Image (tube, rainbow, N blue to C red):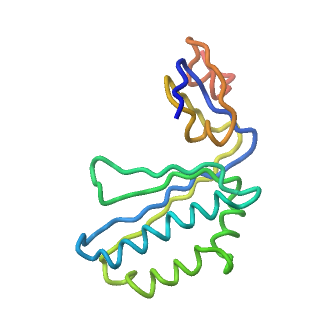
Amino acid sequence: MDVKAGRYTANFPDDFVVFFIGMRINHLRRVNEWVPVMRAAFAMTRELKELPDSPLLESRTMLTVTDWRVPMFIQYWRSMEELETWANNEDRRHRPAQREFFRRTAYNGHVGVWHETFRVQAGQYEAIYANMPRMGLAAAGQYRTLRSTSTMRDRLGDTDAH
């Protein structure tokens, strides 16, 4: 990744969705239960990235320093409707993986899965990057230079800023 020296912000002209999804390895020795979940997650993301005109704008895999057993994805989607359509499409990887998870491990407590979905209206977010590669919302949208004096209210377009 190329680091962009300086201060930048991200612009995205339309509404979008931020989707956090992850798993928790509750029993490390149950490799036969958590490895398939992890493989399925990466396969789903790969499938989405390969779709022509993919509704997935950007995806990052993250590990937390406070609990390494919780790998997760932070994803940016074009719309809630496209996320829902993809998740319920029988011809895509999600539905079979979901059924397999519920068949294999959903009720024994060995592996946890979770997600949070946020619908973001155009202009109702703020993003700043200093000396960073293009990532997150900046990778999904436009990346533009910021003035050294810009404030959060400026970036949000707050007309009531004092």
Query: Which residue reaches farthest bottom?
Result: 103
Q: Quadrant of the C terminus?
A: top right
Report the residue at 46% width, 52% height from top. 61
Front-most of 94 and 121?
94
Residue in front for this viewpoint, 86 or 30: 30
Q: Find residue 13 and report its horizontal and vertical position in percent.
A: 75, 38
All told, the count of numbered labels is 0
The image shows residue 89, relative to residue 11, as above or below, that is: below
Residue 63: x, y in percent?
37, 51
State whether residue 108 is above or below residue 136: below
Left or right, 109 with respect to 19, comes to left
Q: Is residue 84 above or below residue 136?
A: below
Quarter of the image where one finds residue 36: bottom left
User: Residue 114 appears in which quarter of the rendering?
Assistant: bottom left
The image position of residue 123, as x and y in percent, is 69, 36
| Residue drawn at (50%, 56%) of the image | 20
At horizontal 52% and vertical 84% (from top left) the residue drawn is 99
Report x, y in % for residue 122.
71, 41
